[in-house]
Image (tube, coloured by chain):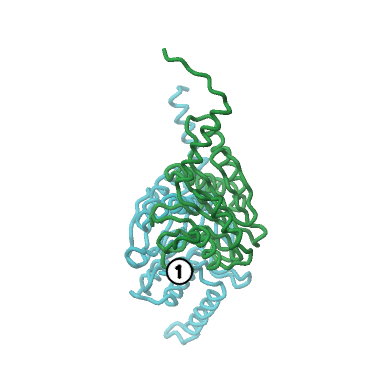
Amino acid sequence: MGLRERSRDHRTSDAAAASFAAGEVPHGTTVVAVTIQDGVILAGDRRATAGNLISHRTMRKVFPGDRWSGVAIAGAAGPAIEMVKLFQLQLEHYEKVEGKALSLEGKANQLSIMVRGNLGAAMQGMAVVPLFCGYDRGRAVGRLFEYDVTGGRYEESHYAASGSGSLHAGTVIKLGFKTDMTREEGIDLCISALFQAADQDSATGGPDLVRGIYPIIASITSDGYTEVEESEIAERFGAMVDDLQTATAAPQGGRA
Amino acid sequence: MSQQFYVAPEQVMKDRADYARKGIARGKALVGLIAKDGVVLVAENPSATLRKVSEIYDRIAFGGVGKYNEFDQLRIAGVRHADLKGYNYSREDVDARSLANQYAQMLGQIFTHEMKPMEVELLVAEVGGEATHDTLFHILYDGTVMDEERFSVLGGDAEAIKERMENLFSPDLDTAAAVKAAVGALAGPDRELEASDIEAAMLDRDSSHRRTFRRFEDDEVAELLS
């Protein structure tokens, strides 16, 4: 076997090993973001899956970037969490060295470079696709950005979703979206989107009432990044479930 | 070929120390003190943009006097040291003692091996859960480290300011009183310092944020002094 063939052989077997491994390593699933009156709501479910198994039930996919921004991740959990850790460090380091925080645009571009850096791994099944939201203090508005695996950065004016359940979650948000929603309306819409995604996508975790596990939801407004209390999320989930039950209990014409 | 004259090492060191001391004495002073609500740092600094006091890490602050470009270089090295350590290990592993030692090593190395010593004095402060766990490290141009118990004075006219501080200091000063005491000591009996001449910041013991460093803007300083 010639050297060239052998190296090609190595490459294919490496790729095969990597794509096999990609099915085995935990992957995070659905995250969503919507703009509201004074900022953005960012939410993510708690499930991580490895192939067809649930590997974690309480994974965190929503993180603060710094005081004025948040990042949510979907994709291979290990590299994704590492990327967030490094991103947070970059923002804080810049702020301390320069004595002034990066602009929101600057932060979004920094994350874009990091996603681009992960392209090699993404091609082997270890993609990381984040959502980035923040309060732009210069412009006094909330803004949100989505990415593709190549580091492409796309600003969205209303909403964004990423991960395996993003199709369903995105549709729910698309139908329920109004401009200038209040914080509460935004949270309810995200809760509903994650619930519907979990209903259709096996890799997305719904609310776990037995163990008391709920999505992590954060608001990023002129007050900065704040996570919504778990008790409030539980209460809002309860109200949504009650609404659904009344809807299904009502007579359904022609089906009964 | 020019002839190299013999100069005694004692003389070399003395000349360097004199040179550094002169440079530092020309600059304005800085006071760091351990107060009830945290560590308060106050500097006389008419510039609103070139800073003497800044954040290093969650519970650690930095103060520098002397030549601006030199202490700023050391500040950035400190931020890098702290951020890397926190990233590689854990945030709780970053402490002021290790940083002070790092600075002492750098300054000592430069003092003995380079032509020109650094014309700076540094303060590395850390806030603990209670006042007895606060630390103040005062580091000199030659790498000497001093662990101070109550307050620390750096820069020009330090001896006189220290004496005034002895009279004004008490461990249960609140933030406003601590800033007032420091400004009083910096100003002395013959002059008044305006809020715009003062740079003030603190490490807030009871901060709800992970990063406890808080800088006071000019209007806040004016309010604290009123």
* A53, A155: nearer the viewer: A155
From this view, report whether residue A188 is shown above or below residue A165.
Answer: below
Tell me the residue at 57%/56% (across/down).
Answer: B59
Q: In which quarter of the image is residue B129?
A: bottom right
Residue B225: image x %, image y %? 48, 68
Q: Going by the picture, which residue comes out furthest to the top?
A: B1
Residue marked by disc 1: A219
Q: Going by the picture, which residue comes out furthest to the front?
A: B190
Residue A98 left/right relative to B42: left
What chain is the green one?
Answer: B
Tell me the residue at 35%/54% (across/down).
Answer: A153
Residue A72 in sight: no
Residue A234: image x %, image y %? 55, 75
Q: Going by the picture, which residue comes out furthest to the bottom?
A: A251
Q: Colour of chain A?
A: cyan
* B7, A140: nearer the viewer: B7
From this view, report whether residue B133 is shown above or below residue A114.
Answer: below
